[in-house]
Image (cartoon, rainbow, N blue to C red):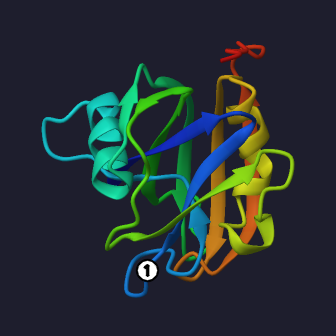
Amino acid sequence: MIRATLCLILKDNKILLLKKSKGLLGQGKWNAPGGKILPNEEPKACAVREVFEETRLIAKNPEEVGLLYFYNNSKRMSLVWTVHVFLTHEFEGVPINGREGRLEWFSIDALPFEKMWEDDQYWYRLALDGTRFEGWFYYSGEFEKLIDHRIEVKSPPNRIDA
């Protein structure tokens, strides 16, 4: 099983997304910065490290809001990815495109869901509202088509208006 993070970076009702470069998992899709957790690395430290590597921003006080579980090949018992989802309104620096892909700010009211992972439409709004949740997503093949999902809300929104 692969453990990873995503960090939703918010500023002025906008979110910073990364369009993944060719040759990377999710190539051509918009996604929040993030990546694999290293051995002995805590999820929060991974989120901060990945944000810096992919954007050159220093994320401040990221709050964990969600936990995502991904299955492929239509299997429900063989977990492939566990992803910790963080949210932050605080960061230092200016985003810079890198080898991981191109960065762009999107209005949180006009996210490009048609160009994102299929599961994002089901949990992004919860994360953006600061609602704690867990989600299970079942894909066919190598994450080609979402065939089923389930989301459990763990707490009401904990709005952080910055």
Query: Please, is residue 132 above or below residue 108 in the view?
Result: above
| Viewer-side residue, 23 vs 103 | 103
Residue that protrudes farthest toward the front in the picture: 94
Q: Which x, y percent locates residue 110?
A: 85, 55
As drawn, the residue found furthest toward the right would be 109
Q: Secondary structure at mark 1?
A: loop
The quadrant in which the N terminus is found is bottom left
Q: Amino acid at mark 1?
A: Ser
Q: Residue at x 71, y 33 (%)?
A: 12
- Count the marks: 1
The residue that appears at 57% across and 67% down in the rendered structure is 75
The residue where tag 1 is placed is: 21
Residue at image position (57%, 60%) is 31
Q: Residue 118, how many percent across, how many down? A: 72, 66
Q: Quadrant of residue 25?
A: bottom left
Position of 40 with respect to 142 (left or right) is left
